[in-house]
Amino acid sequence: MVVMISMVIVLILTTIKIYLSNQIYYESKVVNKMKREVAALKAEKIMLEQSVEALKFKNRVTDTIFVIQEN
């Protein structure tokens, strides 16, 4: 009887461990996906900031050229 109870307890504990391990695995997959998305968005932000700066510079140079040509 004691052996059966011990086996049932071990089985229950093993099942709980497997369930928790699976839950942790799937949650970590979600977290990793979000981290990749954040990294991609940060890279896109940097590219957009550089594009905006280039457009600002181009706009300033163009305005200066028009001012020089008007004189």
Image (cartoon, grey):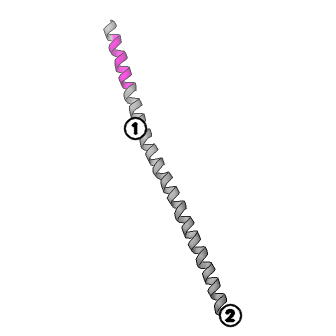
Q: Position of residue 34 (x, y in %)?
A: 50, 52
Residue 47 circle label: 1
Q: Position of residue 56 (x, y in %)?
A: 40, 25
Name which quarter of the figure residue 46 lies in. Answer: top left
Name which quarter of the figure residue 15 lies in. Answer: bottom right
Q: Position of residue 39 (x, y in %)?
A: 45, 48
Q: Quadrant of the C terminus?
A: top left
Residue range corresponding to the magenta coloring: 56-67
Q: Residues within 10 Å of mark 1 (few under 14, many from 20)?
A: few
Label 1, label 2: how far apart the Cα atoms are: 69 Å
Q: Residue at x 39, y 34 (%)?
A: 50
Q: Residues within 10 Å of mark 2 (few under 14, many from 20)?
A: few
**Residue 66 covered by magenta stretch:** yes
**Residue 64 covered by magenta stretch:** yes
Q: Residue at x 57, y 65 (%)?
A: 23
Query: Helix, strand or loop at disc 1?
Result: helix
Residue 1 circle label: 2
Query: Helix, strand or loop at disc 2?
Result: loop
Answer with left or right where residue 20 lies relative to residue 54.
right
Residue type of the residue flagged with mark 2:
Met
Q: Residue at x 48, y 47 (%)?
A: 38
